[in-house]
Image (spheres, rainbow, N blue to C red):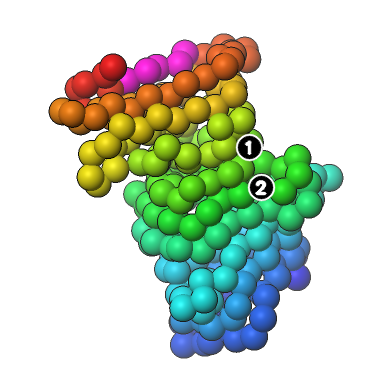
Amino acid sequence: DVGAGITLTESAAANISGGTVQKSGFGTMVLSGVNSFGAAQINAGVLSVNNNTNLGDTAANGAITFNGNAAAPNAPATLLVAGSMASARNITTAGNNSGTIDVAQGATLLSTGVISQTGTGSITKTGQGTLLALGTNTFTTLNINGGGTFASGTSQPFAATATVNLAGGELGLFQPAVPANVAVAATTLSYSGGGYVSLQDSAAASTQLSLTNLSRTGQGVLVLEAANGQLG
């Protein structure tokens, strides 16, 4: 339990082993070692990492579970990705709780695991960096805040029933490494304070976003742009 305003930093020479590591308290815990624990659960505050090895056993790639308390919205359960990294770990929420993925400016988190959601919680992408989600994801509420990018090159970056709330960031839907038609669906795209939706086509394949509802809350402009000069 790391209290508010406190930062606890693991030595780079250390190895945390065992089952599930739980981060509690509103402070920050920085993982720096090549750890071998089984899984991570973030109940409150910030768990900061630079590398997938910081998050435990890289053979099993145990899940990251957010258990943020809805009664403390100003101190969310946050995974801070301070450096570019790739991870095949599943990311999920517990109960009706929520989690935040904060990717630092200049960094990219390449996620190939499944991002899911239990109950009425949500996943929030914040920070100036990029979350590139390439798994077949099933979560239903995505908040994009803070000017960074939530990007994907798959047809299911979130559930087809998802609500995407865009507030000052970018939703980027791109072509996969091998060009193919990409058809992404969501129930609602809501924006406030402005934001970008970027779509990338290739010479022979298209990227589409289908919505049931498009809504604006307050002031702001939604910009639809072609990532490579082609659109439609």
For the residue pair 194 and 211, the one nearer the viewer reads as 211
Q: Which residue is mark 2?
A: 117
Left or right of 104 on screen, residue 91: right
Q: Are marks 2 and 1 in contact (CB under 8 Å)?
A: yes
Q: Circle 1 sits in a helix, a strand or a loop, which is it?
A: loop
Q: Within 10 Å of the Cα at label 1, are there few (<14), some (14-19), or many (20+) other Cα atoms?
A: many
Residue, far right = 71
**Residue 42 among magenta residues:** no
Q: Circle 2 sits in a helix, a strand or a loop, which is it?
A: loop
Left or right of 172 on screen, residue 211: right
Residue drawn 42% across and 37% down? 155
Mark number, residue 107: none
* First to last magenta residue range: 221-225
In this rendering, the answer to whether 53 lies above or below 211 is below
Identified by mark 2, the residue type is: Gln
Q: Residue 158: x and y, percent?
A: 53, 39
Q: Which residue is mark 1?
A: 140
For the residue pair 108 and 229, the one nearer the viewer reads as 229
Residue drawn 32% across and 35% down? 174
Dominant secondary structure of the residues highlighted in magenta in the image: strand
